Image (cartoon, helix red, strand yellow):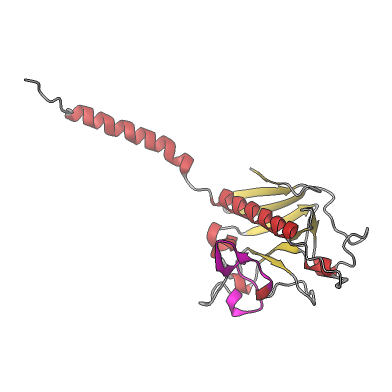
């Protein structure tokens, strides 16, 4: 007759200790890093903005200012974003005022009832504190990830990045441009653009390469 072998109390305690040691080693490596998550999200949305620009370059033969409507991602911090760092993806429409209206903002491809903004001026539906807010809370980097400030430097400035039909990055407010490709106003990025996000744990940078618009995260 065979006897069933059971764990002794000492063996059971040993197993629990080993599991505890493994958990202490592994868990810190799987802990979420809000700064990294914010950068990954922004990089993804920059690529989506570039994608929109390449499939919808806004060219209209009967509109001499068509290039002012290129798809762009703009950072901001105002009352409608609860004074937190947020960003919005939009394509300006005539009369090309430079700011996003509700019907100019990209729709969330995963939920067509939402627009891609973390809070923007113009209507209560873009006010993140309002019950009728139609934007995406995760695009408010301050509320979602604790981002306290942002900086665009190198080849870009003014808190905006837009793309042309080839996916090439441009800088600045498109509404103030005088031609799509003119030496003084074309604003094609001539050196890598760096977007620096700052949070409680430090800084993280995203690089947008000139000409190609290739986007990477710099740890």
Residue at 59% across, 60% down: 141
Is 107 part of what is drawn in magenta?
yes
Residue 7 falls in which quadrant of the image?
top left
Residue in front for this viewpoint, 2 or 207? 2
| Residue 107 image position (x, y, % from top left) | 62, 67
Residue 164 falls in which quadrant of the image?
bottom right
Residue pushed farthest right? 183
Which quarter shows the C terminus? top right
Residue 63 falls in which quadrant of the image?
bottom right
Residue at 73% across, 47% down: 214
Residue in front for this viewpoint, 132 or 31? 132
Image height of 24 relative to 63, above or below: above
Residue pushed farthest left? 1
Residue in front for this viewpoint, 219 or 48? 48
Residue 201 appears in the picture as rendered = no
Residue in front for this viewpoint, 92 or 118? 92
Is 10 part of what is drawn in magenta?
no
Residue 217 appears in the picture as rendered = yes
Which quarter shows the N terminus? top left
Residue at 58% across, 70% down: 82
| Residue 10 image position (x, y, % from top left) | 20, 28
| Residue 161 image position (x, y, % from top left) | 75, 59
Q: Is residue 144 left or right of residue 26?
A: right
Q: Which portion, as a residue range, is magenta?
A: 104-126
């Amino acid at each position: 007759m065979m006897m069933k072998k059971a764990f002794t109390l000492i063996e059971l305690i040993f197993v629990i200790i080993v599991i505890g040691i493994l958990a202490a080693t592994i868990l810190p490596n799987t802990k979420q890093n809000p700064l990294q998550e914010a950068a990954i999200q922004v990089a993804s949305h920059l690529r989506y903005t570039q994608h929109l620009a390449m499939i919808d370059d806004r060219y209209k033969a009967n509109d001499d200012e068509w290039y002012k409507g290129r798809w762009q991602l703009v950072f901001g911090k105002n009352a409608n974003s609860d004074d937190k760092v947020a960003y919005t993806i939009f394509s300006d429409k005539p009369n090309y005022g430079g700011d996003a209206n509700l019907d100019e903002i990209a729709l969330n491809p995963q939920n067509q009832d939402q627009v891609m903004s973390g809070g923007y001026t113009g209507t209560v539906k873009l006010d993140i504190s309002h019950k009728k807010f139609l934007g995406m809370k995760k695009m408010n980097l301050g509320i979602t990830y604790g981002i306290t400030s942002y900086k665009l430097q190198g080849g870009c400035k003014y808190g905006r990045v837009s793309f042309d039909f080839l996916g090439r990055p441009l800088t600045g407010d498109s509404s103030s441009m005088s031609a799509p490709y003119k030496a003084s106003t074309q604003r094609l990025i001539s050196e890598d653009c760096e977007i620096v996000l700052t949070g409680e744990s430090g800084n993280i940078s995203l690089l947008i390469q000139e000409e190609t618009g290739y986007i990477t995260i710099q740890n």
